[in-house]
Image (cartoon, rainbow, N blue to C red):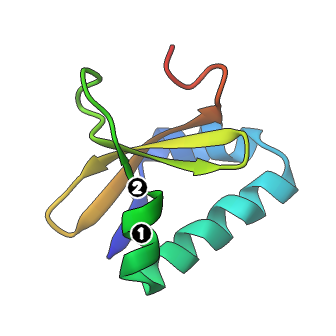
Amino acid sequence: MRFAFTNKVKKKQFRKSDNKTQERITDKLTLLKQDKNLLDQNLKSVINLLPVTHRIRVGSYRLLLSEDNNGFIVLKVAHRSQVYQ
């Protein structure tokens, strides 16, 4: 399983968060890559928010994902109060 960031996410949204949050997100994605069962438990489907197909919770942050042939593309990283706007 592969997780890739879009350029916008990597340059703006991910780097805007503090170092501790960046580390937590990176650790969570690394853990999910290694364990398929854990991925299934943490990956939630999203409806009516195309092109977003799934989300992952990391503390009070949410990662909005789009499914790809090779894995997932991270489309947005934001605090839970702002992520769906």
Q: Residues within 10 Å of mark 2 (few under 14, many from 20)?
A: some
Image-based side of 1 in relation to 32, left or right = left
Q: Please tell me which residue is depicted at 24% across the width and 20% down the height of the picture.
A: 48
Q: Which mark is residue 20?
A: none
x and y percentages locating residue 52 in the rendered image: 30, 35
Residue picked out by circle 1? 39
From this view, report whether residue 81 is shown above or below residue 45. above
Give the mark count.
2
Label 1 close to label 2 by CB (< 8 Å): yes
Q: Residue at x 32, y 76 (%)?
A: 1
Left or right position of 6 against 78? left
Residue 6 at x, y = what percent?
A: 41, 47
Pointer 2: what residue? Answer: 43
- The foreground one among 53 and 9 is 53
Q: Secondary structure at mark 1?
A: helix
Q: Residue furthest top?
A: 85
Distance in Å between CA atoms under marks 1 and 2 = 6 Å
Tell which of 11 and 82 is nearer to you.
Answer: 82
Q: Quarter of the image holding residue 29?
A: bottom right
Q: In the rendered image of this protein, does residue 56 appear above or below residue 4?
A: above
Q: Residues within 10 Å of mark 1 (few under 14, many from 20)?
A: some
Task: Specify the amino acid type for callout 1.
Answer: Leu
Quadrant for residue 62, please give it.
top right
x, y percent for residue 10: 56, 49
The spot of residue 68 in percent (x, y) is: 19, 57
Helix, strand or loop status at disc 2: loop
Residue drawn at point x = 40 percent, y = 55 percent: 43
Residue 1 vs residue 85: left or right? left
Residue pictured at 78% horizontal, 53% vertical: 21
Amino acid type for the residue under numbered disc 2: Leu
Is 84 situated above or below 55? above
